Image (cartoon, rainbow, N blue to C red):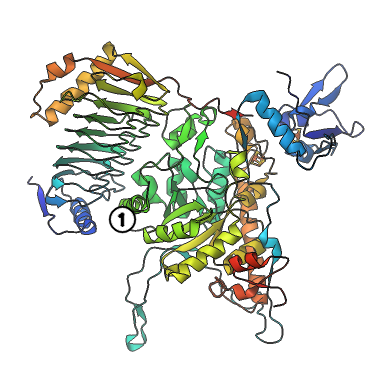
Amino acid sequence: MKSFVFPEFQVIRDEEKCGQCRGCERQCAFGTHTYDPAADRLVSDDHKCVGCQRCVVFCPKNAIMVRPSPSFYRPNASWSREKIEDLKRQAETGGVLLTGCGSDKPFRIYWDHIVLNASQVTNPSLDPLREPMELRTFLGRKPDVMDISADSGEVEIRTELCPNLVVETPILFSAMSYGAISYNAFRALATAASRSKTYFNTGEGGLPREMREEFGRCAIVQVASGRFGIDAEYLNIAQAVEIKVGQGAKPGIGGHLPGEKVSSSVAETRMIPQGTDAISPAPHHDIYSIEDLSTLITALKEATNYEKPISVKIAAVHNFAAIASGIVRAGADIIAIDGLRGGTGAAPKAIRDNVGIPTELAISSLDRRLREEGIRNRCSIISAGGIRCSSDVIKAIALGADAVYIGSAALIAMGCTLCQKCYTGKCNWGICTQDPRLSGRLNVEIASQRLSNLISAWSHEIREMLGGMGINALESLRGNRDHLRGVGLCEWELDVLGIKGAGE
Amino acid sequence: MMAAQIDAADVETKELNDRLRELLLSGAKRVSIRNVCGQRYIGTRLYTPQGLRMDIEVFGTAGNDLAAFLYGHRIAVHGNAQDGVGNTMDAGEVVVRGRAGDVLGFSMRGGEIYVRDGCGYRAALHMKEYQGKRPVLVIGGRSQDFLGEYMAGGVVIVLDLAGERHDAHFIGTGMHGGVIYLRGSVEQSQVGDQVEISPVDEADRAVLAEYVTRFMERFPETEMTKEEILASGFVRLTPRSRRPYGNLYAY
Ligand code: SF4
Ligand code: SF4
């Protein structure tokens, strides 16, 4: 069937600059560029380009430009180009529209409507270059009361403490499974987590055996509805176990890793036969209630000899705070809350762009709810979904999060351009692919260095901002909404966030 | 060597499992637990990096998630077991001389489970196999709805020894691997769209003979003889495709 969708991008080659090296042809897995020997020039099929900018960055002559196609349909406020083209694609295939990455729709980004405080004259600011600034964070259950003895000057904690994760900076890598991302990308995340003294999250695709010993100490392992790659060793080698109930990009639905992506080593790590679809059902079919969840949480605590905190990851949806309270009561030590803009390797577009609530609102209402119920100490909150920079991190913490998960930000650090084609398995940046020719483009050493650089840059900026507020420990900022003010927000939004308007 | 003894009367789940773990670490190879009354996760906390193994006998009613994440141990229950037997089990053997509750063998990837009587809903859900690991679940009675839903591997045999006829529905919905054998017959309306019902062949008979033999060794009290069981009619349920949802998406 002839497709009526016109090219999304336009590839422009400066013939003056082009040296016919055919590098672009090799770079593009979508097959956009081809060499025409008769004319001794390269030609591009705009239809195939997904706008990932790989060829642009790697053209040694800087001869290529890729930009959104200027062609347009008659402007129509109701029928945007995207709506028209999505509809055409479905008319041509009869299929569900898939996409990758977090939602790109213009939902309000609250981070950009919140401003931070700083000290002036009184309560002077602190100089992070001189003063020690504490970013170390403990994730997990804290006791209701702390019983200490202080005999003869020796302070001793009598209360039995629950296992906690210790991170040197409140930034962790979000769950991204081997299978969804390439081995090199997965390993780069693990390497950077280990180097930056934080954690990576295996996602639901298991942890390759040869990585277990080296990276178990910086791994959070996931238990999702498909239960892939899980055995007692996997659970025990990690530092925490996360039950994945939901994901911000696709709340309420499961996932299918298509058989083509289940290569032999992905199959081995997931412990399934090569080439079968890896189906994660929408719910965990052993969890239909808070009581069932509690059973699984305790099963995981038993399986790990009560030595690891258990996290439960849910998507932020309408009544999630009440549910989260149940989750804490069910025994979760950490709640990871993933907002509307959370990323994904593949999700139905209709779900990604329409289900869930922004993470900023979610953090605040969750923190408030747990405080009101007097159980905030029983769990830590990790916020995910739409963290782009250090100021987003610090705002998340002031709204009540203990730490954040970064997913898209980490991928961007490795080269991702948010082209949203992760589900095709042809990622030209070697990130979301199992094609060895493509994944080989991602050098583990360099990618992990880029990730570690990002963590240290953000950590330094967080120290600067903290110092500016006259605070020397992140702990003192947690849930401290007095340091935030809203700009351009409605009354209800300020209420949900629990912050005052700027100038108030 | 004598089996170590634990009296589980009035012992909480955690304490019971503490004791089991201590015994394992101290080198015990056999443990017998009396008066079990709903204590959960028996066998779950017995992972050791060196792979120590233990045989456990349970007298009474085992609580939820018996043998969850089981790592190679053998557990025999003289009584019934509640929900979640063998949840995400990796290796080992569980024998229930009684009936099992819901979500029996959920996501199990290795090892064998034998249940003398029937079981509840959602048995063998998302059971899967991998390389040399092929989980086996044999049920002497009947199973309820959603048996083998999303099943991706392994062998399930439902013997219906009392001859009550299979009345479960949604059997094998979303199934994309593995095989289910039912003694007796089943209607197409009782199974998922993805499931093909076919008669058993020679190879299937060999599989059935192997596991029915093992079932009989574990439950010699069974009224029917092995020969009678194996001479009965069986049907085989297999997935039509390993990619049931391959055509769902627009690219
Ligand atoms: S898909 Fe990427 S590599 Fe291919 S032509 Fe477009 S921008 Fe260049
Ligand atoms: S991971 Fe690759 S395919 Fe996915 S958005 Fe980034 S560049 Fe595109």
Q: Quadrant of ligand 1?
A: top right
Position of the N terminus of chain B by quadrant: top left
Splitting the image into 4 quarters, where does residue A131 fall?
A: bottom right
What x and y, as percent, mark residue A248? Answer: 56, 49
Decide: is B151 above or below A178: above
Total number of numbered labels?
1
Q: Residues within 10 Å of mark 1 (few under 14, many from 20)?
A: some
Residue extending farthest to the top is B202
> Is A489 left, or right, of A367 in this rendering?
right
* Residue in the image at 36% along x and 58% along y: A330
**Element type at marker 1?**
loop
Decide: is A469 above or below A424: below
Do we see residue A79 in this rendering?
yes
Residue extending farthest to the right is A16
- Chain on which label 1 sits: A
- The amino acid beneath tag 1 is Asn
Given residues A391 and A325, the one toward you in this image is: A325
> Is A89 left, or right, of B96 in this rendering?
right
* Residue in the image at 19% along x and 29% along y: B141
Splitting the image into 4 quarters, where does residue A58 fall?
A: top right
Decide: is A428 above or below A444: above
> Is B85 left, or right, of A444 in this rendering?
left
Given residues B32 and A336, the one toward you in this image is: A336
What x and y, as percent, mark residue B104? Answer: 28, 38
**Residue identifier under label 1:** A305
**Assess mark 1: CB under 8 A from ligand 2?**
no
Given residues A263 and A82, the one toward you in this image is: A82
